[in-house]
Image (spheres, rainbow, N blue to C red):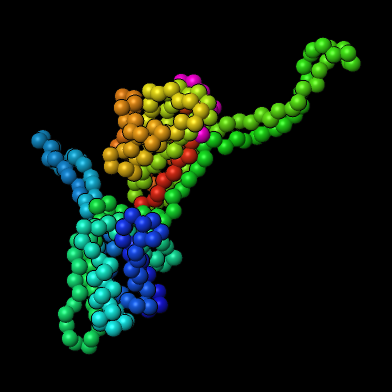
Amino acid sequence: MAGAPVVTIVRDDGLGEGNPRFVIDGTRWFLVNGGLDGFDCVGYEVSTGDYAQYDGAYLLGERSGTVDRTITARALVGRFAARREAEQFFVARRSYEVHVEYAGRSRYFVGRQYGFRLSVDPGDGVQELVWTALALDPCWLSEDEKRFDLAEAEGKAGFAFCSWGARKSPPGFVHVAGFVAGVIRREIWMDNAGGATAYPRFDVSATGEVKNPVIRILDAAGAEQMRVSLTVDLSAGDALTFDFSARPTLVLLNGEDASHLVRPGSTLAAGVEPGRFQVVWSADSGDAALSILPSIRERYASV
């Protein structure tokens, strides 16, 4: 059907690009009318507490819970072939990525199989499939991560210079090979163009000696939203990872857990709200030897 969403379901078998796929694009399977349930919204839970001496209430918290998303599709191939294809693909206790292309957008969510039914109706012989996945993270994710390199140099200029020394002609004047000067960026503006909180990742590498690196996120008004710092001495070749999208937040040093090195007062359970924000970094010493690659994957309430 023209304009219908295209659904590609990928089962995580640990095979990378070789993971099995189930495609609903009108070739072998097609979506029935209204065949995507729970794909158009994310629910919110708002909790309040009543004032003892005033009207109304005060806000205690807000959060989004898990979401059931159900796909209803019918086969365009014979009943036997359709049943065999679905039975071999949809397996309990597995993780699935559900990718949807619709209205020029491509987004996906990750879920666990929660329900699976193949109709047993003689009827017209058309095989129907009803499959439900439980999205532990209710939001839709962008297919691509936004990445920015904080270690770019700006305004580079190369020139030769001279220094005094012993030389016959002209006396005391020595020409030395030129060098390149540049300004290392210690901040960069980024943009969360999604419709929900995004959780950044920082991949940090050292090209020299660095003492106690610090990374901060500021909102458009300059207010600090997030700070993470480590008590650690880095040497050339060391690599740090801060991944706020992991649960709990992942802190690695050269691939090993480094959460014990996080300084008190660091923020380890926060995200970036929609809009522009700034990432800045520093260190007690050696910050010019830091190469920092921040990235975010935008999140949405609908496809």
The extreme bottom residue here reads 124
| Residue at the (31%, 61%) spot, across then down | 11
Residue 284 in percent (x, y) is at 46, 20
Residue 83 in percent (x, y) is at 24, 76
Q: Is residue 18 above or below residue 226?
A: below
| Residue at the (23%, 47%) spot, across then down | 63
| Residue at the (77%, 22%) spot, across then down | 176
Residue 6 in percent (x, y) is at 37, 70
* Residue 301 makes an appearance in the image: no
Query: Residue 137 or 168: which is nearer the viewer?
Result: 168
Quadrant where the C terminus sits is bottom left
Answer left or right for 90 relative to 52: right
* Residue 141 makes an appearance in the image: yes
Query: Residue 302 or 129: which is nearer the viewer?
Result: 129
State the extent of the magenta-drawn residues as a range: 284-291
Q: Is residue 3 magenta?
A: no
The extreme right residue here reads 169
